[in-house]
Image (cartoon, helix red, strand yellow):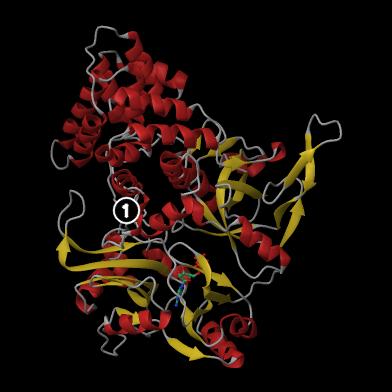
Amino acid sequence: MKFRELAKYFEKIESTSSRLSITQILSDLFKKVEADQIKHTIYLLQGRLAPLYEPVKFGLAEKMIIKSGVVALKIKKEEFLHEYKKIGDLGRAVEYFKKGIRSLEKKELSVMNVYRQLYELASAGGEGSQDVKIQTLVNLIRSLDALSCRYVVRIPIGVLRLGFSDMTVLDAYSWMIKGDKSLRPTIEKAYHVRPDLGQLGYVLKKEGTGGLKKMRPAIFTPILMMRAERLSSGQEIIEKIGRCAVEYKYDGFRLQVHYSAKGRLPSGQKKIKVRLYSRNLEDVSYMYPDVIEGVKREVKANEIIFEGEAIGFDPHSGNFLPFQETVQRKRKYGIEEKMKEVPLKFFAFELLYLDGKKFLDISYLERRRALERSIKLTGDIFKDTLLLASENILDDPKKLELMFDDAVSKGLEGIIAKKLSGVYKPGAREWNWIKFKRSYSSKIEDTIDCLVMGYDFGKGKRAGFGIGAFLVGVYDEKQDKFLTVAKIGTGLSDEEWKQLKVRSKKLEVRSKPVLYEVDKMMECDVWISPSIVVEIKADEITKSPVHTAGRKLRPSKSGKALEVDIPGFALRFPRLERFRDDKRPEDTTTLGEIKKMYNT
Ligand code: ATP
């Protein structure tokens, strides 16, 4: 396919506000693309060159892109900046000038060719690499038509944002094969084990749905992490799952470890042995060199995928550190120094894959025993980096409560009870794991993870920050939409308001994203694309006509308008607990969970 044709699809998607129409446009596109090009097409549609968990950075600042535009289009910088300021979008500014210049030669570049050039641009490193990057972009701008330029320029600055989610792509794959979304559950199951939309598309095109059944976990492709249900007493837990394994709930960072003793070559990179992925499947290996070394030293396996929680450790007292201290290890700079101050211990608790054998469909008990055999323990907590999550097999609610009290007295969050016969279900929140947390002084026993959808400008003191209240929502899995539950205007420190503003800056979009359902009363001054997840503490879940989570509308008596039939759910006294950078937008609390919390 020519890139010019793909750009027309970009444009169609950009100007569509219905999720269903976007799904159909995508499915139409996927039907036309050849199997060996679908990976590249899907990554470009997401403004990337590889799946989410492959860190490919373009390394081209906005001013370099402006320079590329000016050189390619042979115009004065002032003239370009003037127009850019008016239009407010770098892609459209380049498109505007390109339209006006008929004399420049245009070549018909294929999607693969543009992909390759962008890949070269991203991979250029070392001395003189900025010049190489600029020249590559100059060549692309010169060769492509105006509309293609709009999108090619947006990709390296990370502002393509066509506003559809991975779930929309899964639906589109189903439409591509079946003409409806009936295959989505089967495709989604495979996606949970191999969340690479490109690879999924390739398998579907080559082998149809039969190929999905053969998809197995792969080293250096993170598996979507399993999640826990909630209960708030030992009695309820034993009634629900009977005799179970009870582990401490450590409060640190959940990591999925991928290890290959021989080392492997993930796409275009140098051979590596260990990779660490966060909850939202980001490669965070560079942040935790001590865990990486620990894995190399203390794992007994050729190839393994396992999970656990990394938590700060005080090497003087031998105590574990609270989350507020552990969190200091989450940083991009000064990693080595912080590592000495806050070394980490890693409590392994789940085995997913070992030496060619998939452990997902195997019972908890077997997984745990195999995990125990895969880690070398000296028994000296000062020496070992890898440890096993402490585990007790219990069937007495009182003993479970005692273990819970013990966990709380150690400063931990609580416990996790695991069903002995329970399998590991990637991406699912199931009763195979049940968390029992220190309850808060509120009527809801857990915090709620919400997506930040937009914000209003501040008044008074907060006018200085440029942000005064922000709108948050939860995820409706059935509709693949975000529905609002609160607008939060208090309870943040000055630092947190500033942080929120800075984080929002890069994510601002011109109009409300298609995935958001928001009442008129809750509209925001600024909309931001789905990215920032926050953990919210609230006193209670109440009902409100202005929030869309769980709200049902019906035609008014006159039949001309809609009125509220069933009000939505809203959070009472919501306040920010922490930013949850380890979660993807789809990992926020779901509408189903909110309903359950409201009813208990
Ligand atoms: P929370 O905000 O309560 O930590 P969450 O939404 O991040 O919950 P859940 O799946 O609901 O995630 O709860 C399980 C979390 O508890 C895991 O993501 C993991 O980070 C943490 N955890 C700590 N210790 C354990 C353990 N022994 N087994 C499983 N998970 C554990």
Residue in the image at 47% along x and 44% along y: 171
Residue in the image at 46% along x and 20% along y: 87
Say which quadrant the C terminus sits in.
bottom right
Question: Relative to residue 220, is residue 42 depicted above or below?
Answer: above
Q: Secondary structure at mark 1?
A: helix
State the image coordinates of residue 233 (x, y, percent, origin top left).
63, 82
Asked whether, in this view, residue 324 is left or right of residue 110, the answer is right
Residue in the image at 23% along x and 20% along y: 108
Residue in the image at 41% along x and 42% along y: 177
Residue 465 or residue 226, whichever sits in front: 226
Asked whether, in this view, residue 144 is left or right of residue 253, the answer is left
Q: Label 1, on which residue?
A: 211
Disc 1 C-beta below 8 A from ligand 1: no
State the image coordinates of residue 574 (x, y, percent, origin top left).
66, 57
State the image coordinates of residue 501 (x, y, percent, origin top left).
51, 44
* Count of marks, rendered view: 1
State the image coordinates of residue 580 (x, y, percent, origin top left).
49, 58
Say which quadrant the N terminus sits in.
top left
Q: Residues within 10 Å of mark 1 (few under 14, many from 20)?
A: some
Question: Relative to residue 510, is residue 440 depicted above or below?
Answer: below
Outermost top residue: 103
Question: Relative to residue 398, is residue 35 depicted above or below?
Answer: above
Is residue 218 something one can see in this rendering? yes
Question: Relative to residue 9, is residue 580 depicted above or below?
Answer: below
Is residue 79 something one can see in this rendering? no
Q: Amino acid at mark 1?
A: Gly
